[in-house]
Amino acid sequence: MSDLLDMAVVGAGPCGIAVGAAASTAGLGATLYDKGCITNSLVDYPYYMTFFSTAQKLEIGDVPFTIADSKPTRREALGYYRRVVQYYGLDVRQYEEVTSVEGKKGDFLLHTRAQSGAEDTRRARALVVATGGFHEPNYLNVPGEDLPKVKHYYQEPFPFYDQDVLVVGAGNSSVESALETYRIGARVTMVHIFDEIDRGVKPWVVPDIRNRLEKGEIEVFWRHRILEIRPASVVLQNMDSEETVEIPNDWVLAMTGWVPDREFISGLGIDIDDETGIPSHDSDTMETNVPGIYIAGVLAAGYNANKIFIENGKFHGPKIVEAVSAG
């Protein structure tokens, strides 16, 4: 067990890094823990993804994000956030999971476990939870979802050449995976519970997907849901008439979103609104109903993942540091 930290941060994604950067600027001692690597969720993004936000809006602290184009790629963002960690000299414990927390404001005791299995403890005056919203998929909860052909994340199209692919949803991830797999020769079908693509889809992608749908190059079942996933097919159901249709299928790309680690959050004593999924917190300081425990990043948006992004979640860090500094 080591000396008392000013703050321990659970999660080393962009918003967790922003907390660490703000702490460093204020002269506070902080250690970041992540059960994966730095910006682990970005590592799992599609390989060729381009961000919706401009590079400037993704910047943290005093580190400029300079690129040739206005919107960075996944690879550029991964490199940038590593530079932020290096610039501020942040103490990041990668592949070290915080398994439990004891104590109270002013003296929390963290129990951690490294990838090797080695266990450790660390004390901190304040605790910041910045674990993001990618703990586990938002499951369909239908028969056959456990089949190996069902994928809840997508990285590149090449494995799906000359395959019957069903893409679930019509948000950014769904639309981009549908277009990419279509372009390398997959037979793509989309299914969505609503009757149009989501409003948050990147503007420059909308004309492309609409043209593909209108020309029938990508088939779509609006107002349908998956009833059952079978080894060589999928059964869809019309949500209005309840009629069913069975279509041939090799792969299901279930781009239905992800959910945060509610078990860890509630285990800390933090209240979570059942309807919104938002942990109880003061939006001015980001402190939760548990004194000394703060949240940062997309966690504060609950189930509405389109409310908080890197570009606004990064501002939680300075708020938290100011509150911790004030005691």
Image (spheres, grey):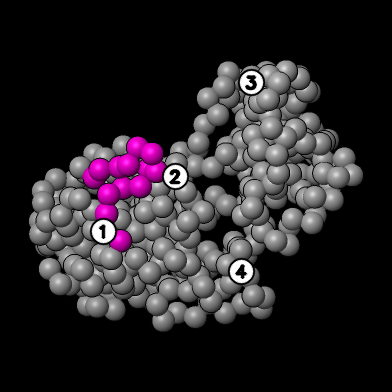
User: Mark 3: few, some, or many residues within 10 Å (few <14, many ≥20)?
Assistant: some
Circle 1 SS class: loop
314 left or right of 172 in image: left
Sequence order check, earlier mark of 3 and 2: 3
Q: Quadrant of the N terminus?
A: bottom left
User: Mark 1: few, some, or many residues within 10 Å (few <14, many ≥20)?
Assistant: few
Q: Which residue is mark 2?
A: 303
| In the image, residue 276 lies in the stretch drawn in magenta | yes
How far apart marks 2 and 4 lie (CA) works out to 26 Å
**Above-or-below relation of 113 to 202:** above
Q: Are marks 1 and 2 in contact (CB under 8 Å)?
A: no
From the top left corner, tell me how far across and down residue 149 is, in percent: 65, 28
Please identify the quarter of the rendering in which residue 127 is found.
bottom left
* Disc nearest the viewer among 3 and 1: 1
| In the image, residue 206 lies in the stretch drawn in magenta | no
In the image, 233 versus 74, the foreground residue is 233
Q: Which residue is mark 1?
A: 282
In the image, 1 versus 302, the foreground residue is 302
Q: Which residues are magenta?
A: 270-283
Residue 72 badge: 4
Circle 4 SS class: loop
Sequence order check, earlier mark of 4 and 3: 4
Is most of the magenta stretch helix, strand or loop? loop
Residue pictured at 23% horizontal, 53% vertical: 288
Q: Which residue is mark 3?
A: 227
Please name the amino acid that badge 4 sits on: Pro
* Disc nearest the viewer among 4 and 3: 3
Sequence order check, earlier mark of 1 and 4: 4
Q: Are marks 3 and 1 in contact (CB under 8 Å)?
A: no
